[in-house]
């Protein structure tokens, strides 16, 4: 679905399609534990977040050079642009690369090569958000922030991702304080598999400005009231929730109930190469499965620009919002 939209929850490593994974494996002399793309695709049946993360981190072995990261980002931007994305705030996981001996500079400069040309080439404005892996230590997060200092001109915010259960946000209080002192924006995954209390903690302890997922807020009516009253954006990823079994089937996704409760919902693709669709596909899927009408979809698109970190460029935000209003559904 081509309505103009911002994508605010997208892990660039989760856009690694099987074909590109094999091409990069060939280029870099990396042997993958799968015979071909067909066999790799059969591994895309996940029981939960962890079984997905195991494959997601394993496939990153093919990403080694600046050119690899540039090609990865260009492939995403091409697909995103074709599905109406006008602005993308892109997550990356520095520690997943530095742990393999790939310097953070290789990652950021490689992605940056694609992002620098994105407006011209794809008509998509971009930002980069570096995520701390919450199943690693608080010290490692602080070291990662330190290592990112030479590249902060390319990075607009910090996030928190990876295995959620057992890794509450408060563990990263110091890293978020330090990030805030550097002028970085703050988001955090919370309430994907973890309890509603993790959402509250992400807001109160980390100062998160948006909550990535936030799905489980629906278990806590007081929290729903607070999120709605404070207009805290939630970056929902319905196809991801089904593939990682947070929700049984898309028809049972609470997106519509969340919108009805006054929550500022956005719809995003998370790891589209793994979860069966990019963000335009996701709009289409929720339209069909949840009976969301065109005005719901326009609201989701409007919300995505309202929730974007475009405060330094309100003129651009207004331009994108007027594209949303002018869009004619076919
Ligand atoms: N859905 C997700 N949740 C947590 N960490 C992730 N890393 C990539 N995708 C993720
Ligand atoms: Zn995510």
Image (cartoon, rainbow, N blue to C red):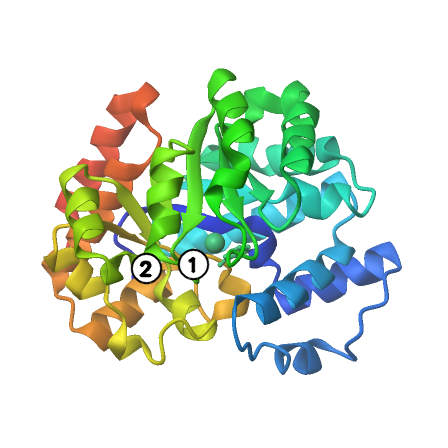
Q: Position of residue 129 (x, y in %)?
A: 51, 36
| Mark 1: secondary structure | loop
> In percent of the image, x 42 and y 38: which residue is there?
187
Seen in the image, is 69 located left or right of residue 226? right
Seen in the image, is 230 located left or right of residue 310? left
Label 2: few (<14), some or many (≥20) within 10 Å? many
Which residue position holds label 1? Answer: 194
Pick the quarter of the image with the C terminus: bottom left
Q: Is mark 2 within 8 Å of ligand 1?
A: no
- Can the viewer see residue 231? yes
Q: Position of residue 105 (x, y in %)?
A: 72, 30
Residue at the far right in the pictured view: 29
Which residue position holds label 2? Answer: 215
> In percent of the image, x 35 and y 31: which residue is there?
309
Q: Position of residue 74 (x, y in %)?
A: 58, 47
Name which of mark 1 and mark 2 comes first in the sequence: 1
Q: Nearer the viewer, mark 1 or mark 2?
A: 1
| Mark 2: secondary structure | helix
- Can the viewer see residue 68? no
Closest to the observer: 143 or 26? Answer: 143
């Amino acid at each position: 679905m081509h309505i103009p939209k911002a994508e605010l929850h997208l892990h660039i490593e989760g856009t690694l399609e099987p074909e590109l994974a094999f091409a990069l494996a060939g280029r870099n002399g990396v042997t993958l534990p799968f015979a071909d793309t067909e066999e790799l695709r059969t591994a895309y049946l996940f029981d939960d977040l962890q079984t997905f993360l195991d494959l997601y981190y394993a496939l990153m072995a093919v990403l080694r050079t600046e050119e690899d990261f540039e090609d990865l980002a260009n492939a995403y931007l091409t697909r995103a642009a074709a599905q109406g994305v006008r602005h993308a705030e892109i997550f990356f996981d520095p520690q997943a690369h530095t742990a393999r001996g790939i310097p953070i500079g290789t990652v950021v400069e490689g992605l940056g090569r694609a992002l620098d040309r994105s407006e011209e080439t794809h008509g998509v404005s971009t930002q980069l958000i570096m995520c701390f892996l919450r199943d690693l230590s608080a010290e490692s997060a602080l070291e990662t922030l330190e290592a990112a200092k030479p590249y902060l001109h390319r990075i607009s915010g910090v996030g928190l991702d990876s295995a959620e259960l057992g890794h509450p946000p408060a563990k990263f209080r110091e890293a978020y304080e330090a990030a805030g002192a550097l002028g970085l924006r703050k988001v955090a995954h919370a309430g994907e598999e973890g309890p509603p209390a993790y959402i509250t903690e992400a807001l109160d302890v980390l100062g998160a400005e948006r909550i990535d997922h936030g799905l489980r807020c629906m278990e806590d009516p007081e929290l729903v009231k607070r999120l709605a009253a404070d207009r805290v954006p939630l970056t929902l990823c319905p196809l991801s929730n089904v593939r990682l079994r947070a929700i049984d089937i898309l028809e049972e996704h609470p997106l519509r109930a969340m919108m009805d409760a006054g929550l500022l919902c956005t719809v995003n693709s998370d790891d589209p190469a793994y979860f069966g669709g990019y963000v335009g596909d996701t709009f289409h899927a929720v339209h069909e499965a949840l009976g969301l009408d065109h005005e719901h979809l326009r609201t989701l698109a409007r919300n995505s620009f309202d929730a974007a970190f475009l405060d330094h460029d309100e003129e651009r935000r207004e331009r994108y919002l007027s594209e949303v209003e002018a869009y004619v559904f076919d």
